[in-house]
Amino acid sequence: MSRRLSSPQERLLRRLGHYSQTLEKAWDVTREISLPGLSESLGVVRSALNAPLSFLEKEGLIFKRMAHVIGGGSRRRNVYHLTKEGRLLFESLGEDTLKPRKSSSTATAYGDVPQIGEVFGRSALIQSAFSKVNEHHSFILSGLPGIGKTTLGVALSNDLIAAGTPLRWSTADEFSDFEALCSRMELPQTLPSDFEALSEYLAKQCKGEIFIFDDVHLLSQRHLSRFHAFCKKIEELEGPKFIFIGREPLVSFEHIERLSIPPLEISEAVKLLGEVQSEEERKHIAERLGGHPLAIQLYQKEATLPEANSDVKSYVEDVVLSTLDDSTRSGLDHLVLLPRPIDASKAHDDEIVGTLDDSAFLRWTPEMEKMELQHLIRNVRRSSMTKQEKLKLHREAVIHWESFAQTPDDEIILLFHRISAESDDLDTHCNTAYDALASTQSNALSVLLEQAIDSSPNPSHLHYLAAKIALERCEPAHAHHHLESIEDEGSFNEIAMSLAYFEGRIEDADLAIKKGLEIGTQQQKNQLAISAASRLLDDRIEQHLDKEKVAEIKHYLGHIELADDSVQRTATVVALTMVQHALALVQANFVKAETLRATLVSIGGVDNALVLGLEAKAALFKAKANNHSVSKAVQLTRRAIEQQTNSIHRDSLRLTLVEALLDHDKEQANAEFLFISKPDESAKSILHHRLHARWWMFTSHLEPSLRQVALKEAISKYRAAGCPRAANMLEARLHSML
């Protein structure tokens, strides 16, 4: 076929040729074959594609239809496919000489690297950035909103990959901390959370790589200092290099080498406009829009161009946004205040999503699963809103998200709007969110609690929650900051006790327990006594427990009084018997342990699997105490593990099995260890901290390359669990290795 196509026509034909014919009858199709998707992949404004698309359609080479675009809202939109004749022509075109050849490099990009189209006019800047990578451990790509920071970063990434340098990419939002950003980078193993452990792990495992953090200007003050501390420590350890991408001004990054991104040269900016208009017209448009890439992408043929030397902000406010109809503006406004991208289907008006997307107002996460407003649009509209307008939108958002919140991410969005809407009963809402989200969203919760404190007339309880989550995140400085503002005596004492344990101030912790046993209700005293006794039992590395500690445990248990309420009474008896059983095993009093298990069996409603698990632990302890073969105990333990429905009980029992096997069959111990849940989330409770501490301790035994990192993390987790003696024992073990 000898038909000649213009460059834009050929590029469209080649692009559509990459997609299967099976999409032609599909109800749900990829966004890449819609006008916005084609525009972004080819690097030109939407309007520049209208003429070449019309030509290809007229010539019978493509056809368009209405379909639902995946993730693009509920409204059906125009999508494009090759006809049979178009596919034949595509197959006859041969190799695309304009497309860069694939690199032979084996290096890889990990994480949520954005998708970009063709890049115009940045070759010299990319080369300059490439040089800075070689010259500096860290540097910043900075510039105005919409100037092309991310685009340049991705183009630089492609060159780095081609040169054989592996890299990892993560994009920040208003709740991100360093650990959360790292978790999105496809790192090969479970990440520790302790500052020293994580820094050392990344420095060792990712040496020679580059970490790229996009949108660092969004990082909250709550997490910023720790973020910088991590980067500084990793640099000291000569670990991976860093590239930060963010919007000016970046005051907190002033000490880092910077590469500022200017507008495009007019000769390059015109290329974004395609070839529909004359060269003179395109030059005029590019000049009036100051060579600003996003401003040019937002250009509509019918729109009035700004006066010469007008800033982009004014253009967006006075021209782009002023032309929107009421429905579109309303849909846009409900996206303006969002703190992070959301599923398009959960937008306040998901029918408007397509309209906003067609107008280049949206940006999407790499897999097109979530979207948000272009930050330039968002910032301009936010700055023009009054406090009352924002308050109204937040209150409407609360109503909306109350019915749409299904995931932890959704719940965070809901809490954000509740706080910003100055909702009543904020303490209750934050309590509920804490219980549900502390284990998976601690970074976001810690930011939101700070915001709630600022807006609450009586923030005492919020200070308690903020201190509590700071301790769970192993951030004692933040806990100290909030402690003095906690008015409730019991809550104050709880945080003070946890802080004392974390910092190894055992006498202060004991005094706090003593006070708690004096001031609390009987139920609170029972809970504290059992907690304190359990803590002492777990605050060790070896099975041995000295007489002084045994006496202390019995002293705490002596404060327990059974309630008249049958449910509370049963729960207390079960908890008490469990502690007594653990103590009996440590003392090698296996007869008493058997009696206690019989007591549990006699209590109605006690899970048989729980009793079987205790029997298995007793068998393992007895075999070790008597220096007998553990084979029978191992078989019993495996049966017990299979019966467990509670994940904590199951993993705890398997860890006990691993401990028993370490001295007999390390290979078998390692095989069992692989079945244990990895501590890839924040701890939900003290029990989780202790479980995670043991997991990391055994990792130090089973993975020699991670020995020091694993020990540091185990030490941190033991401190968070209120086990300073165990932490000190491991610390001594660590120092002996250095």
Image (cartoon, helix red, strand yellow):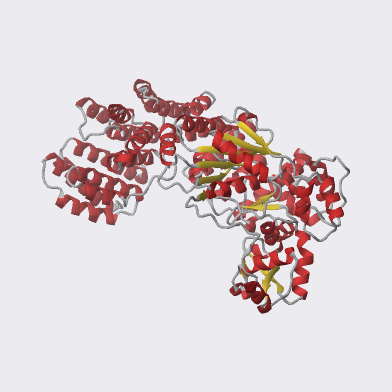
Q: Is residue 17 above or below residue 568?
A: below
Specify whether residue 239 is in view: yes
Numbered-mark total: 0
Q: Position of residue 252 (x, y in %)?
A: 61, 29
Q: Position of residue 225 (x, y in %)?
A: 55, 30
Q: Quadrant of residue 170?
A: top right
Q: Position of residue 504 (x, y in %)?
A: 36, 24
Q: Quadrant of the N terminus?
A: bottom right
Specify whether residue 321 is in view: no
Left or right of 340? Residue 712 is left
| Residue that appears at 75% across and 73% down | 57
Q: Quadrant of the C terminus?
A: top left
Q: Quadrant of residue 351?
A: bottom right
Could you say which is closer to the camera, residue 269 or residue 57?
Answer: 269
Q: Is residue 477 above or below residue 293?
A: above
| Residue that appears at 35% across and 50% down | 647
| Residue that appears at 15% across and 48% down | 630
Q: Position of residue 346 (x, y in %)?
A: 63, 56
Could you say which is closer to the camera, residue 650 or residue 662?
Answer: 662
Could you say which is closer to the camera, residue 427 or residue 225?
Answer: 225
